[in-house]
């Protein structure tokens, strides 16, 4: 309020009467001298602020503001006395400060809200009406803040695998990525990055066979997890059968990481976006021929996503080679056609994503067809 009402600016362009350090000093002295009951009984932020501003007016009137850390040091000079500022501070009471807060903060916030919230401020003639209106702003802000955070997470789900796909992962780059992603997000993004890196190794191994570099990368990615056996099995991948088994083990590890990632995201953002946690597990079940398991999971996912209670769905990248190996043949074929028709999709991975619902429906129908064929041939 002091800054907005320009009380920090002097009339004659000399040094202002009030500076931020005066306000900080005021609060420090209040924390030490005011009893606990002054802060907690009849808890009212407006009352507390109004009384503190009145105290500041007394300090200005007496040109006395004792330094909190330095004894016998007054940080208000007599030349800084400003009668107009002192009078304005002294006139502030709860009603005045409440009106100022409503007009300068609460109403501008309400203008950002949906119409049903904004209209509540057409009539705030009573404390109850004002309290209800403010509560709606707070509720909307909490919901929108969570949704905005989810949009950032959704962008990261696109950006991280795009970067992994663009550059071959090394043990050094993995350490860098894991450290940087840990700073941003405690666990989720590290899991997603690890999954994308594991899928890249699985793809490279299926095409080019074993490489010594894979061992260092896997040791970095899988340290402290249940999939350290990958590191001991990898050097023995000499035959096509052993290579195939290792690729499957890497894919399984990646799917485990992705499933854990989905569980964490669903826990944190389930109120603003509908997320099923077994989409990658269903995809992997289909790819390895476990059609009954895929059918069970995808049917559950279709039901959950069709009757969702939120307006948003999570998505899956489909053009990146790391994730293509998990997709069923129909989606891969459609993706290839899309990339042929629209060249922009080749350059920009943001255009080549499908929702969990589309994947679930596709896996469900493919599993039904595969199960039926299996019963006929059996």
Image (tube, rainbow, N blue to C red):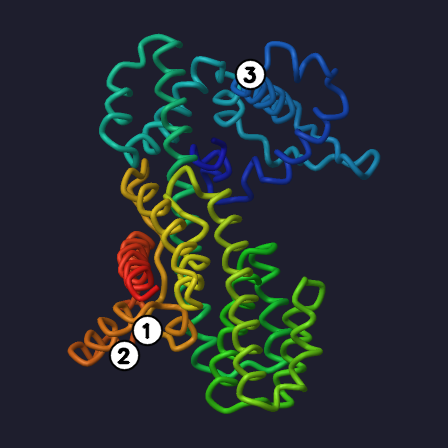
Residue to which mark 1 is pinned: 319
Residue to which mark 2 is pinned: 346
CB-based contact (under 8 Å), mark 2 and mark 1: yes
The label on residue 44 is 3
Of pointers 2 and 1, the one earlier in the residue sequence: 1
CB-based contact (under 8 Å), mark 2 and mark 3: no
Eyeballing the image, is 373 above or below 108? below
Residue name at image x 41 percent, y 48 percent: 276
Q: CA distance from mark 2 to mark 1?
A: 8 Å
Q: Is residue 373 visible?
A: yes
| In front: label 2 or label 3 | 2
Q: Residues within 10 Å of mark 2 (few under 14, many from 20)?
A: some
Taking the view exactly as shown, the residue that stands out farthest to the right is 71
Please state which of residues 265 and 97 is positioned toward the viewer in this rendering: 265
| In front: label 3 or label 1 | 1
Eyeballing the image, is 81 above or below 341? above
Residue name at image x 36 percent, y 68 percent: 327
Taking the view exactly as shown, the residue that stands out farthest to the front is 378
Q: Residues within 10 Å of mark 3 (few under 14, many from 20)?
A: few
Please state which of residues 192 and 347 is positioned toward the viewer in this rendering: 192
């Amino acid at each position: 309020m002091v800054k907005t009402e320009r009380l920090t600016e002097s009339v004659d362009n000399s040094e202002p009467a009030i500076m931020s350090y005066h306000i900080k000093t005021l609060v420090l002295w209040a924390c030490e001298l005011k009893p606990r009951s002054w802060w907690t009984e009849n808890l009212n932020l407006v009352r507390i602020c109004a009384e503190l501003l009145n105290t500041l007016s007394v300090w200005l009137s007496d040109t006395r503001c004792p330094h909190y850390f330095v004894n016998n040091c007054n940080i208000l000079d007599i030349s800084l006395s400003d009668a107009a500022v002192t009078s304005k501070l002294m006139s502030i009471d709860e009603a005045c400060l409440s009106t100022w807060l409503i007009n300068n903060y609460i109403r501008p916030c309400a203008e950002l809200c949906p119409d049903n919230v904004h209209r509540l401020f057409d009539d705030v003639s009573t404390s109850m009406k004002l309290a209800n209106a403010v509560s709606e702003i707070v509720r909307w802000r909490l919901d929108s803040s969570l949704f905005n955070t989810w949009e950032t997470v959704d962008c990261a789900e696109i950006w991280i695998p795009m970067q992994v796909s663009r550059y071959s992962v090394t043990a050094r780059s993995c350490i860098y990525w894991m450290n940087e992603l840990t700073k941003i997000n405690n666990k989720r993004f590290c899991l997603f990055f690890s999954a994308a890196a594991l899928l890249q190794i699985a793809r490279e191994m299926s095409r080019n066979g074993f490489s010594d570099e894979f061992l260092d990368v896997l040791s970095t990615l899988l340290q402290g997890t249940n999939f350290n056996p990958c590191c001991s099995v990898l050097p023995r991948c000499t035959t096509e059968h052993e290579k195939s088994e290792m690729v499957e083990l890497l894919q399984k590890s990646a799917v485990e990481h992705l499933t854990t990632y989905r569980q964490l995201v669903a826990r944190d953002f389930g109120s603003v976006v509908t997320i099923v946690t077994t989409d990658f597990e269903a995809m992997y079940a289909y790819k390895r021929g476990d059609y009954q398991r895929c059918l069970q999971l995808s049917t559950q996912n279709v039901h959950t996503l069709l009757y969702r209670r939120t307006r948003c769905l999570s998505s899956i990248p489909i053009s990146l080679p790391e994730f293509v190996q998990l997709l069923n043949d129909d989606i891969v074929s459609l993706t290839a056609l899309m990339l042929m028709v629209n060249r922009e999709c080749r350059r920009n991975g943001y255009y080549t994503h499908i929702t969990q619902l589309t994947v679930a429906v596709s896996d469900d129908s493919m599993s039904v067809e595969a199960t039926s064929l299996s019963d006929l041939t059996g």
